[in-house]
Image (cartoon, rainbow, N blue to C red):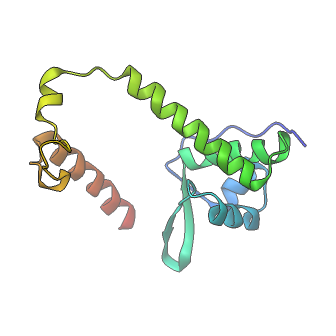
Amino acid sequence: MSSVLPPIPAKRYFTIGEVAQLCGVKPHVLRYWEQEFSQLRPVKRRGNRRYYQHHEVLMIRRIRDLLYDQGFTISGARNRLQELAHSDREVHAADLPVEVEDVEAAPSAQTGTPLDERPCTPLDVAQLRKELEEIRAFLL
């Protein structure tokens, strides 16, 4: 059942019909996979319309490959995706440089300081503002 899939265009959001064409599956299959795979959470707007982002299209293609080409069951594909995500996190965590001052300033279970009580840094606020502005622009 392996077929060549079209390239993913450089867009921020895709409708369910576009994703169905890009991934070679029917829209009802995508809706079912949303129930089965927690990684798929498209943005929903007016009338419950789904809008998928680029990373979700890639995830759907990966799910399709696991189910259709490699012969995994839904449960097996779900477990495989969790394994891949776990190994990706370990690889990225190993690549991150650790600075002594960051480790000392970070709240820990030993100090008893809850994470939600730590002060926000200007970088956190700037990133949050940027994300909120993107969401606002999308909703308007």
**Left or right side of 78 for 123:** left
**Residue 58 visible in rendering:** no
Observer-nearest of 129 and 34: 34
Observer-nearest of 46 and 94: 94
- Using the image, determine if residue 140 lies above or below residue 57: below
Q: Position of residue 12 (x, y in %)?
A: 49, 49
**Left or right side of 96 for 61:** right
Q: What residue do we see at 52% from left, 37% from top?
A: 86
- Using the image, determine if residue 88 lies above or below residue 57: above
Q: Position of residue 116 (x, y in %)?
A: 17, 55
Kindly give the residue lying farthest to the front in the view shown.
110
Q: What residue do we see at 34% from left, 59% from top?
A: 135
Q: What residue do we see at 12% from left, 25% from top?
A: 101
- The number of numbered badges drawn on the structure is 0
Quadrant into which the N terminus falls: top right
| The quarter of the displayed image where residue 40 is located | bottom right
Q: Position of residue 71 (x, y in %)?
A: 85, 44
**Residue 83 visible in rendering:** yes
Quadrant into which the C terminus falls: bottom left
Q: What residue do we see at 72% from left, 54% from top?
A: 75
Kindly give the residue lying farthest to the right in the view shown.
1
Observer-nearest of 108 and 73: 108
